[in-house]
Image (cartoon, helix red, strand yellow):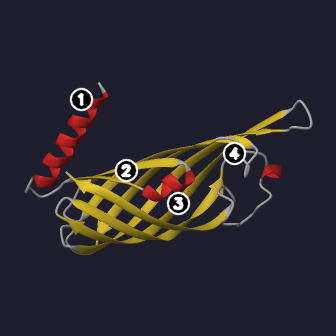
Amino acid sequence: MKKTVLFTLLTVFTASITAKQKPSTFVYNKPLGFLLNSFEIGFDKRISDQGFIGVMIGYGAAEENDFNNGDMEELKFEFNFKTFLNKYTDKRTYYVQPFLMYKQRKEDGYDYFGPSRNSFKTAALDIGFVFAKRYNWDRMFMDIQLGGGIISPISGEKEDRYYISNPIVPYSKGVHPRIGINFGISI
């Protein structure tokens, strides 16, 4: 079964790369998320000559280790709108992307000196924009993004939000930078 699925995905991938029509859909992945134990995939659909509307879904998880004494799960959902500043089929092109992201994180911490286990959920909204440069190679592309947004926690207790405007803490309230690389294919 696994071989059949992999063969089908490989066939679709090679067929989409060799097609010569103008692309109308982008599928991309954010590989830097793998460093943080997360997987993020996005889909963009063309709605005008230079405009694309898209969604990105991400999931991350981490188990207890030497650096953190608890388990963590994270879910992300992003809605975005890309506007290319010149033709999106050029070898090098630029775009501006406003976005709205909902993030939810669940953490389970363990207390080894007592029989307690503390668990909490945090959710936040992130609104902002990125400016990006895209490199196109036939049907494959790479985006380098730079921007930021305002994050506002929408759940959790006020006492849990010790870090206000600290970009190192993922769900703290304030302005956070956003830097990223996307790899994808045009269909």
Instruction: Tell me the kind of residue under disc 3.
Output: Ile
Q: Is residue 40 left or right of residue 11?
A: right
Q: Could you give the CA–CA distance between mark 3 and mark 1, rounded to whole angstroms? A: 41 Å
Indicate the quadrant where residue 60 lies. top right
Residue farthest to the right, as pictured: 113
Q: Is residue 46 visible?
A: no
Residue drawn at x 31%, y 29% as measured from the top left: 2
Mark 3, mark 1: which one is toward the viewer?
Answer: 1
Task: Please tell me which of labels 4 and 1 falls first in the chain.
Answer: 1
Please name the residue that numbered disc 2 is placed on.
Answer: 42
Residue drawn at x 19%, y 54% as measured from the top left: 24
Asked whether the beta carbons under mark 1 and mark 2 sit within 8 Å of each other, the answer is no
Query: Observer-nearest residue: 104 or 70?
Result: 70
Please name the residue that numbered disc 3 is placed on.
Answer: 127
Please name the residue that numbered disc 1 is placed on.
Answer: 4
Query: Observer-nearest residue: 186 or 3?
Result: 3
Asked whether the beta carbons under mark 4 and mark 1 sit within 8 Å of each other, the answer is no
